[in-house]
Image (cartoon, grey):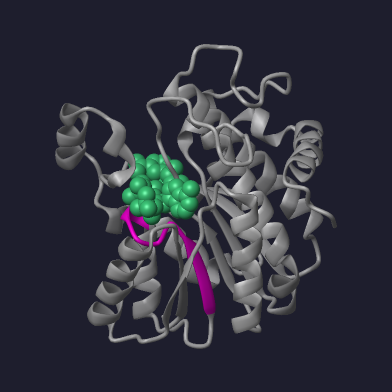
Amino acid sequence: MSMQGKICMITGANSGIGKATARVLAKMNATVVMICRDKERGEKAQKEIIEQTGNKNIDLLLCELSSHNDIRKLVSEFNNKYQNLHVLINNAGIMLKKRKISIDGYEMNFAVHHLAPFLLTNLLLDVLKKSAPSRIINVSSAAHKRARIDFYDLQSENKKYSLFRVYGISKLALMLFTYELSRRLEGTGVTVNALHPGVVNTNLGRDQSKFSQGFAKVFFKSPEKGAETSIYLASSPEVEGITGKYFVKKEPRESSEESYNEAYAKKLWEISAEMTKLIV
Ligand SMILES: NC(=O)c1ccc[n+]([C@@H]2O[C@H](COP(=O)([O-])OP(=O)(O)OC[C@H]3O[C@@H](n4cnc5c(N)ncnc54)[C@H](OP(=O)(O)O)[C@@H]3O)[C@@H](O)[C@H]2O)c1
C-alpha cells in the first residue's frame, strides 16, 4: 500500500510501538513527522528509520507533551512548515511507579494520555479538516476497562497512588475524548478511532522491576506486531470513513460501558478545555 503524499504525525515515535509505526509508514512512502521529547533519542530513531527505509521525508519535531506551552509551540512550528496533515497518531505514553505532576500541575498519566492528545488534536483540527479525508488515531489500552472516572478526583490525589488504576483512568479519559470528538467531527471527513495494541515488549515498563522486564521480553508481542492496528487505522482503505470505534487486532470491539457515557464525555471535554486553556 502506498502512503505517498500523505503527511503523518506520530507522537512518541522514537521508541516501541510509535517507532515501529513510523518505520512502516515510512516504508509506505508517507512523510512522517516524528514527535519526540528528547533530541538525541529522536535523532537516533530518525536516522535509523531513514537508513532502513530509504525514505528521506522523515522529520523530527521536539515536544514535551506534558507541557501545554510546548504543545502550542509544536503546533505553530508544524503549521509554519506544513500545509496538510492526513494522519495524527496520539501514541506517546508512560507508566510511572510514583505519582508525578506535570509542569502545568496535572497528574502525569492524565497529562500525557489525555490532556496532551486533547490539546494537540484540537489545535491541529483546522489543518486536519483542510486535509480531509484525514484520520486521528488514539493509542489507548484495554486497561481503560477496569477504570472509573471520578470527577471529584481527576488528579488522583485522594487515594494512594496505584500505577494500574491511574494509568487506566487516563486511558478511559482518552476513550471518552475519542467518542466525543467523533460526534463533534461528524460530516467533516475527519475520522477518529482508538485502539489497544496488545501487550507489547517496549520501553513502557522501564520503571518496573528487572523481573517484569525479563518476563516482557519473553512473553509479550514485538513492537512490530503491536504497531499493526495503528498502521491499519492510519492506512487501510477498509477503515475509510469509519469513526468513533475502538479497535483490537484490527477489528472493532466494545470498549467499557463507562467509555460510552455521553454526559461524562461532555463534562470531561469542558473540564479539559479549561485545564488546557483551549479557546474554540
Ligand atoms: N506496551 C504495551 O503493552 C501497551 C499496552 C497498551 C497500550 N500501550 C500504549 O502504547 C503507547 C506506546 O507505548 P510503548 O509501549 O511503545 O512505550 P515506549 O516504548 O515507552 O514508547 C513511549 C513513547 O512515548 C514517549 N513519551 C512518553 N512521555 C512523553 C512526553 N511527556 N512527551 C513526549 N513524548 C513522551 C516516549 O519518549 P521517551 O523515549 O523520550 O521516553 C516514547 O517515545 C502508549 O500510549 C501506551 O500507553 C502500550
In this view, the residue in front, 254 or 120, is: 120
**Residue 225 rendering spot, x and y as whole percentages:** 30, 55
In this view, the residue in front, 11 or 74, is: 74
In this view, the residue in front, 61 or 57, is: 61
Q: Is residue 122 above or below residue 213?
A: below
Q: Which residue is rendered at x = 49% and y = 22% of the image? A: 165
Q: Which residue is rendered at x = 61% and y = 22% of the image? A: 148
Q: Which residue is rendered at x = 79% and y = 60% of the image? A: 186
Q: Is residue 197 visible?
A: no
Q: Is residue 16 left or right of residue 35?
A: left
* Span shown in magenta: 7-17
Q: Quadrant of residue 88?
A: bottom right
Q: Is residue 205 left or right of residue 239?
A: left
Q: Quadrant of residue 229?
A: bottom left
Give the number of callouts. 0
Q: Is residue 192 left or right of residue 64?
A: right
Q: Which residue is rendered at x = 64% and y = 51% of the image? A: 68
**Is 12 covered by the magenta stretch?**
yes
